Image (cartoon, rainbow, N blue to C red):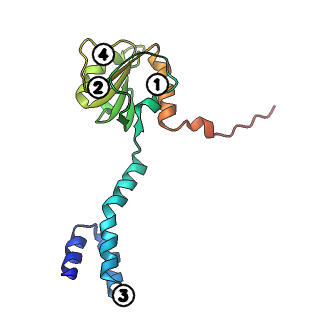
Amino acid sequence: MLKHKLNRSLSEVHPEFIRIYSNKLRMNFDLEYILKLLSLLPRALEIINYIINPMKVMKDIIYGIRIIEIKGNTNIAVENIAFDSREINNLSLFIAVKGVSLDGHDFISQAQNSGACAIICESLPEILNDEITYIKVLDSSKSLGIVASNFFDNPSEKLKLVGIT
């Protein structure tokens, strides 16, 4: 029974994992120990995924920006930030920035359709989606810099700068 469970569990795992542990089985490792390791594999994958793709909470990301109005919940998870609507997916924050030739506000509907969970803009769209958080700000360009810094844990604070005159 135990050997059958092990073979079934190993067949669902990556071939390299099977090769390593089949060698260990030849060395008379305890089967219960191997099964215990296999039971921990899904949790280990969750931890690795969190390290690779960390999520942040919206209220922490928007700290420090000049907010005029908020429509929706700021206690939501954000996995990605973007000012290009083509890079939006589920759990993304879209920042609509006015440019020289294009206005990001024209692409808010595309970001909504792509699954954005929140939108930072200077003017709210006419039709609001109840599932999306809208944050109206004074200057979305400045907000983009602050949001990016907060999202990536303020990397400039970790720099050591030396000036020689």
Question: Where in the figure is residue 91, as x and y percent of width and height?
Answer: 32, 35
**Cα–Cα gap, marks 2 and 3:** 55 Å
Q: Residue at position x 68%, y 40% from top?
A: 160
First in sequence: mark 4 vs mark 2 = 4
Residue where numbered disc 1 is placed:
144
Instruction: Give left or right: position of 66 versus 1.
Output: right
Quarter of the figure with residue 92: top left
**Cα–Cα gap, marks 4 and 3:** 64 Å
Along the line of sight, which residue is nearer the eye, 126 or 159?
126
**Cα–Cα gap, marks 3 and 1:** 56 Å
Q: Are marks 1 and 4 in contact (CB under 8 Å)?
A: no
First in sequence: mark 3 vs mark 1 = 3
Q: Residue at position x 52%, y 24% from top?
A: 64
Disc 3 element: loop
Dot in front, 1 or 4: 1
**Cα–Cα gap, marks 1 and 2:** 18 Å
57 vs 18: above or below: above
Question: Where in the figure is residue 14, as x and y percent of width and height?
Answer: 28, 66
The disc placed on residue 106 is: 4
